[in-house]
């Protein structure tokens, strides 16, 4: 029962990340501001992360490497914010 709920949550998180990525991509198409394309890429990476977490077994030794994808997504988000703040000064 718990495993099915976990799979459902991973699917929901993947879908939410894809929807957010597509929304930011739409904002980028309207404004051509690279802030939005960077956020779109970050949420696309988060979607890839959730798929990988769902399919990589919990007892697999290298599962921690999957979280490097999430780290890179967060670094892109931080970079987008810093870039946006520098551009406004």
Image: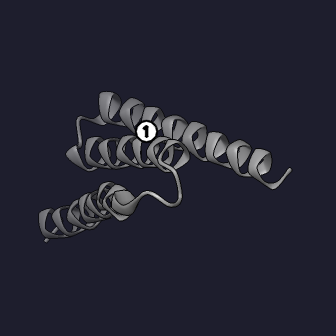
**Residue 61 pos. (x, y %):** 37, 62
Q: Secondary structure at mark 1?
A: helix
Q: How many marks?
A: 1
- Residue 45 sits above or below residue 70 on the image: above
Q: Quadrant of the C terminus?
A: bottom left
The picture quadrant where one finds residue 36 is: top left
Q: Nearer the viewer, residue 67 or 88?
A: 67
The picture quadrant where one finds residue 81 is: bottom left
Query: In the shown orientation, is residue 22 left or right of residue 78?
Result: right
Q: Nearer the viewer, residue 11 or 86?
A: 11
Q: Nearer the viewer, residue 42 or 68?
A: 68
- Residue drawn 26% across and 47% down? 38
Tell me if mark 1 has few (under 14), some (14-19) or many (20+) residues whose alpha carbon lies within 10 angstroms of its own: many
Chosen colour scheme: one colour
- Residue drawn 54% across and 35% down? 19
- Residue 29 sits above or below residue 15 on the image: above
**Residue 31 pos. (x, y %):** 29, 36
- Residue drawn 51% across and 42% down? 55
**Residue 87 pos. (x, y %):** 13, 62
The picture quadrant where one finds residue 28 is: top left
**Residue assigned mark 1:** 21
- Residue drawn 59% across and 36% down? 15
Q: Nearer the viewer, residue 41 or 12?
A: 12
Return the residue found at the far right: 1
């Amino acid at each position: 029962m718990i495993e099915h709920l976990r799979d459902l949550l991973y699917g929901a998180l993947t879908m939410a990340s894809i929807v957010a990525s597509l929304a930011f991509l739409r904002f980028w198409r309207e404004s051509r501001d690279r802030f939005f394309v960077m956020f779109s890429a970050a949420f696309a990476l988060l979607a890839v992360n959730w798929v990988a977490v769902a399919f990589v077994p919990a007892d697999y030794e290298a599962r921690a490497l999957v979280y490097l994808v999430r780290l890179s997504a967060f670094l892109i988000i931080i970079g987008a914010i810093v870039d946006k703040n520098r551009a406004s000064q």
